[in-house]
Amino acid sequence: MTDRSWFGVVVLVLFSVIVCGCSHKKNADDPSESPNPVIREAFSAAAEKGATVGHTADPHTFTPTELRFGRAPQPAPGLVYQDGIVLMEHGDKALRGVGSDGLTWLFDANAPHANEIQVDKIVFATDRCVGKVLDVQRSGDELKVILGPVQITDVIKQGHFVYDQPVDMNSFIAVAAPDYPGAPGSDAWEKMKAAGQTSSLRNPGNNPYGEPRRERPTVEYGIVSPSGEWRPMPTISPSGTAHLVNASWHPPVMSGAGPAFMQAPYFPNWPQVPPAPLPTIGGVPQVQIPGLSMHPCFINCDGGGIGLHLYADKQGVKVDLTAVLHMSAPHLHFNIDVSPGYVKTAAIELSGAAGFTITLRAGAMQDLQANLHEFGQVPLEIQLPVTGLGVPLVVRLVNTFKLDTGFSDKTSMLVAKGDFTASGALTVGYINNNWGATGMKMTLKQNLADAVGGVSVGINSLVFGINQTLMVGLGAFGFATGPYVGLTSTITALDQSSIAMRPCRQGTFQVQVYAGIGWSIPKVIASVVNFLLGLAHVKPVPASGDILRMKNPLPLVDLKDDLPLHCASGAGK
C-alpha cells in the first residue's frame, strides 16, 4: 500500500473548522458567558445542576473485547434505560465478531440475553453495537444480526450528562469499516451501478424502496463544462433564524413480535465480507479505497497540529492535497439532559485551534480519460470515549466528502494554497425548544486567488467539499445517534487558460454549520445501504431520523477572491 493515505483529510478538515478557537480559558471562553442567550442558558449552572460528570476514558486500559467491540452499558445513579430493550451489561463479551461492512454483528447465542434478540427489538450491547434489529439468523451457537438506526431516547429514558475537559489527542480510537457500503467505490456501490440504480439525478422508476431519485449530495460544488465554462455553485444558504422542525420519521420502540431466530443459513444473498480490522489507539490506520489513499499525521505535522495527505490517482487525473490544523489546547464541553420521552437540553462547545493551512496540487495526465467526481462517506471514524456516566457515550467524528476536478485539456496542472488564522470557538445549544449557535472567526493570511496557479491551454478547477459531523452519542458510522453539530465546507480553485488574453484566477472558501439530535446520512448513501440490505431481503432504513434539528444552517465563512479583481464575476451567473 502506498504511504499516501486519505483518512487524515477527513480528520483534519473536521478539526480545522470546528475546533478552531482559542485555548480554553474559563473566564474568556466559558460558554455560559456567551452573548447568545440560548447558549448561555444551555451551559448555565442551573442547566447543568445535578448532572453526572464524565471524564476522558483511557482506551489503553480497555480490555481486548472493549477495544474491539466497544464498552457495555452499566448502571449509574440517575440513569434509567428504556423499558423493553435488550440491555447487555456484558455485551462486549457476548460478541464474537463485527463485519467490515459496519452493519453485521456476530453474537454468542448462549450469552446472557442473547435469546431476547428479535427482529424490531432494540439491542444495546456496547457503545458501537446498539440499534434496532433489522434481521437475525442463527447458525449453531452464533447469531448473525443486522442493526439499524435508533434514537438516543429509544435507549435512554432518563439521564443528565456533563463533560468539560481538554481533548487528549493520544486517547482516541480509530474504528474502520473498509467495506462500508456508503464508501466511494465500495463493492455495494459498484453493484448498484451495475444494476442501473445509482444515479442520484434521475428517476429510473425501478426503486424498490420508494425513495426519490432526484437527490443531491449535501455538498454543492462547481462544474466545468466540456466547453471549458466554469460554473461555481453556492454552498452558503441565506442567513436565517435557526428553529425547530418536526422530524420526518422516528422509529417506534416495539415490544417485538415474530421469531427470535430463523433456522436458515446465514443470509444466502448477503455478500461475504471479512471481519473488521482491529480498532487502533492514538493513530489512524491506512485504509485504501480504489484510486484514493490518505496518510494522516498527529502532533508531528509541519508547524505542529493535526494533518492529512489526500492522494487520488484515477482516470488520468492525479490530486495531491495536504492540510494541517495548527493546534493550541483543544477543549470539549457538552451538556446533555434526557428526560422521559424527549431531550431537554443538548449543548456542545469545541475550541482549541490557532490556524489552518491547505495546499493542493492536481494534474491531468496525457492519458486523461475523465475528470474525478468522488462522493461518499469515509468508512472510518475517530472516537473519543467518555467514562463515568454509566452509559458509554462516545464523541465521534464522522465525515462525508466530495472531490471534483475540472480539467478541460490534457497535460494541465493546477496548484493552490490557503492559509488561515482562527479564533473563538464553535458552540451550539438547544434548550426550551430553542437553538443557538456561534462560530469561530477565520482570517485569511493572503489573497486566495494570488495563491492559485498552473499551466494549461484551457480552464482548470478543483473543488473539495466535506460534510463533517461531531456527535456525542451511541452507535457507529451512518447510524450513530445523539446530539450533533455538523459542518459543510468547500474549497475551490480556478485557473484560466495560460494562453488566454485575459488571465484569471479565483479561489473560494465557504463554511456553514448545522445541528440536530438524531442521525442523518446523505440520501445517496442511504440508497446504496438499502440496496445492499435489499440483497438480503432486509427492509430498508430511512436516510435520517432527527428528533430535532436546526432548519437553517449558520453561515460562518464565505470568501471569494479574483485576480484580477472581478475577472470571474460572471462565471457563476
Image: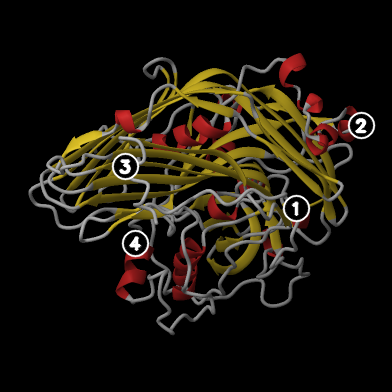
Above or below: residue 571 compared with residue 134: above
Tell me the element at label 1.
Answer: loop
Residue 439, percent across and down? 63, 33
* Front position among marks 2 and 3: 3
Residue 301, percent across and down? 39, 19
Q: Which of marks 3 and 1 is nearer the N terminus?
A: 1
Residue on which disc 2 sits:
46
The three-letter code of the residue at mark 1 reads His
Gap in angstroms between the C-alphas marked 2 and 3: 54 Å
- Residue 358 is left or right of residue 153, and the answer is left
Q: Nearer the viewer, residue 397 or 156?
A: 397
Q: Which of marks 1 and 2 is nearer the N terminus?
A: 2
Q: Earlier in the sequence, mark 2 or mark 3?
A: 2
Q: Which of 558 and 529 is in front in this view?
A: 558
Q: Earlier in the sequence, mark 4 or mark 2?
A: 2
Tell me the element at label 2.
Answer: helix
Q: Nearer the viewer, residue 72 or 93?
A: 72
* Front position among marks 3 and 1: 3
Q: Which of marks 1 and 4 is nearer the N terminus?
A: 4
The three-letter code of the residue at mark 4 reads Asp
Gap in angstroms between the C-alphas marked 1 and 2: 23 Å
Residue on which disc 3 sits:
567
Circle 2 Cα neighbour tier, 10 Å, few/some/many (<14 / 14–19 / ≥20): few
Which label belongs to residue 220?
Answer: none
Residue 546, percent across and down? 69, 58
* Front position among marks 1 and 2: 1
Q: Nearer the viewer, residue 39 or 335?
A: 39
Residue on which disc 4 sits:
187
* Front position among marks 1 and 4: 1
Which label belongs to residue 243?
Answer: 1
Gap in angstroms between the C-alphas marked 4 and 2: 51 Å
Residue 212, percent across and down? 51, 75
